[in-house]
Amino acid sequence: MTTGRTDVEIHGHCDPQFQAVADAFAQNFRERGDNGASACVTLDGRVVVDLWGGWKDRDRTEAWEADTLVNVWSSTKGMAAVAGHLAADQGLLDFEAPVAHYWPEFAQAGKQDVPVKWLFTHQVGLVDFDGDHPDGVALDWHEVCRRLAATAPQWTPGAECGYHATTWGWLVGEVVRRAAGVASFGQYFRDQVARPLGADRDFYIGLPDAEHHRVARVFRAPEPDPAGEAPPPGNLGAVRGDPVAARSGILGMPKWSASPASAEWKRAEMPGMNGQGNARGLARVYAALANGGEAFGARIMSPASVERSARVEYEGPDRCLGVPVRRSLGFMLPASDLDTRPPEVFGHGGMGGSMGFADPVRRISFGYAMSLMAPAAGASGANDQRGQALAQAVYASIGEPL
């Protein structure tokens, strides 16, 4: 499908009812600076929008294809959270139980009573580990988990909430991995979540080498950096002078986790920040949460688990982001005046603008993934005007303008 209103060809399909979404997607390229992107929407478990267009690179030499993947940063957290809720639904994980029940080493440094749920809600106070930070340490799953288990919390667990921009992935991933008795969190996600929902070629946590050629390069707007790629989410709280908040993103810096364009980054499992996916993968996974736990012929969790996923567990200030937030167990809910989505929507965005969410009231799921990262999107991505424009078009298409 080509819109004819821009020099970017828009490919894919869009039900006539959702033409406004196709128009907004084209407008993102024409007026909002998009370089390469994909957008996908489901309604009642049926794909009604599946679009892609633009380029995989900043120089616009490689076309964005139907199966192009891109680093979606913290949108990965939403996918990882689904795996956590699935493990709970399988009776493997109890959110109220101490983390140490599943991960005995975690009991060090006074953390023996910390419940699993505080890992999911960013309330445990482990935004970084103590001690030295060897080059490339974030590529070593077991070493990061060993160091986090030995570290004392940076605030009293449960007393505050602060965005664990990078460590969230290992904290949640390790407790799920141990509870499920599997060798790899990424493989658990693939086998238990992505594959049943037909998203196993559209979202990865730990990308096989054979798929690296499909990945687009992420980069910042408006000023390109010398390496031609976006730096990860470092120093989130530095401008406020909070030394703890300033540590929240450091494990994502290239010195400790490699360049996002590198094979090492793509291959690693870092469930808080390095999922390689596209809008189709996000929307297909969230379709299950928008439809009582079942979509595309597969039930991955119970309706009760979906209700738990959407239930607000924390509402208030975030120490690391410096803004008010609303969080369920692993997901973010609209909290900003710039986020016009209905309040019951839940999901997660990524630094620079990627976004995925479920709306169980209207049985809608949504995914947006792109290569050009907008600074105004924020660390969690939900405020990006491109994703917001697409979401507004979705609701206008069903007669509920935002």
Image: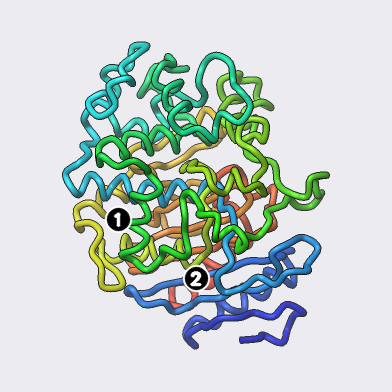
- Circle 1 or circle 2, nearest the eye: 1
| Label 2 SS | strand
Residue occupying the point 61% across, 86% down: 1
| Label 1 SS | helix
Sequence order check: which comes first, mark 1 or mark 2? 2
> Which mark identifies residue 192?
1
In this view, the residue in front, 143 or 166, is 143
Say which quarter of the image contains residue 218: bottom right
Inspect the image, locate mark 1, and give the three-letter code of the amino acid beneath it: Gln
**Does the CB distance between marks 1 and 2 fall below 8 Å?**
no
Does residue 46 appear in this view? Answer: yes
Q: Is residue 336 left or right of residue 125?
A: right
Q: Is 114 situated above or below 89?
A: above
Quote the CA–CA distance across marks 1 and 2: 22 Å
Q: Residue furthest front?
A: 210
Crowd tier of the residue under label 1, counting other residues whose Cα lies within 10 Å: few below 14, some 14–19, many 20 or above: some
Q: How many marks?
A: 2
Q: Residue furthest top?
A: 109
Residue occupying the point 52% across, 35% down: 166
In this view, the residue in front, 397 or 298, is 298
Residue occupying the point 42% across, 42% down: 326
Rendered location of residue 258, percent (x, y): 64, 38
Inspect the image, locate mark 2, and give the three-letter code of the amino acid beneath it: Cys
> Which mark identifies residue 40?
2
Rendered location of residue 130, percent (x, y): 52, 16
